[in-house]
Image (cartoon, rainbow, N blue to C red):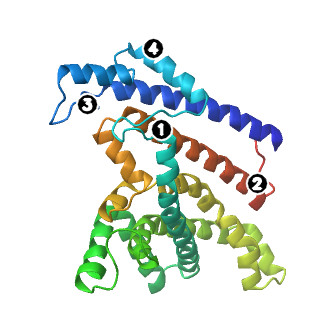
Amino acid sequence: MSAYIIKRIVSAVVTLFLVATLTFFLMYLVPGGPFLSEKAPSPQTLKALEEKYGLDQPIGVQYVNYMKRLLHGDLGTSLKMRGQEVNDIIKTRFPVSARLGLMAVALAILVGIPMGAVAALNRGKWFDRLIMFVSTLGIAVPGFVVATVLMYLFGVELHVLPTFGLTSPLHYILPVVSLAFYPTAYISRLMRSSMLDVLGQDYMRTARAKGLSRFKSLFKHALRNAVLPVVTYLGPMLAGILTGSFVVEKIFTIPGLGSQFVGSITDRDYPLIMGTTIFFAFLLITLNVIVDIAYKIIDPRIKLK
């Protein structure tokens, strides 16, 4: 286990280096600049700003300087949010996205896994068809449509839930449900497929033939093995949701990291784009390692290499 973790750490460092390098050079290939807005500054002011932030230097020099700062954990200073460190912006915004994301993930797991399992146990019956219809709808409908419909129905028509901000527990309901809609549908389909595969295995028939009750065979053997594909999906799903859903945060006016990332691209805020991208990559890699270890805990037969 220790050798595997060390190997993954080395692999993670190389991956982060490649992500940072590619993002840095691709970012500068995009036309425009951080100080070229509708009210563009005078040439003298523009020159002074570029000198202040080192943007007047050759791109190779800028890259080396950025990587040196990155080695010390310094993500730089935002070009648009003057005086604010990127580290501080992420520390402020990420907890907001994380709270929403964890609630959405918990909701997706608590609803999606039982839905998929029950659908598999009732294969071909009306309940199975109903769950598959709802889950297909959840996968097909874009998140912004779900968020808009929920906002209109419960916020505008019924006036029972707030539609913007996060100032009370009620404010979390619509964004969390919107974020959880797709992963719940995906998990339920994944769980149903995996459960059907497990139920058809020989060891399940053997367990029943030896007198094990249906309830025990399902919970002791079927669910434990069927949930493995769902665990695999949790890694990238967690990273995506925890760093913030760009659209949902924008629609509900939530000051999370997702909406901040979208704003940084629009503003060509290079340090903030780099910082949030590297943070997202770090989170994705870390969660994937945790998922691999969870795999081993759930099924000790799996060998980590």
Dot 2 or dot 4: first in sequence order is 4
Q: Amino acid at mark 3?
A: Phe
Dot 1 or dot 3: first in sequence order is 3
Q: Residue at x 38, y 12 (%)?
A: 58
Q: Amino acid at mark 1?
A: Gly
Q: Amino acid at mark 4?
A: Val
Q: Secondary structure at mark 1?
A: helix
Left or right, residue 184 beside residue 80: right
Q: Residue at x 50, y 20 (%)?
A: 65
- In 3D space, how far apart are the residues under numbered discs 2 and 4 (Cα atoms)? 45 Å
Residue bearing the label numbered 2 = 296
Left or right, residue 267 beside residue 187: left
Left or right, residue 108 beside residue 145: right
Residue bearing the label numbered 4 = 61
Depth check, front residue: 112 or 280: 280
* Residue 35 numbered mark, or none: 3
Q: Residues within 10 Å of mark 1 (few under 14, many from 20)?
A: many
- Image spot of residue 113 (x, y percent): 57, 72
- In 3D space, how far apart are the residues under numbered discs 3 and 4 (Cα atoms)? 20 Å
- In 3D space, how far apart are the residues under numbered discs 1 and 3 (Cα atoms)? 19 Å
Dot 3 or dot 2: first in sequence order is 3
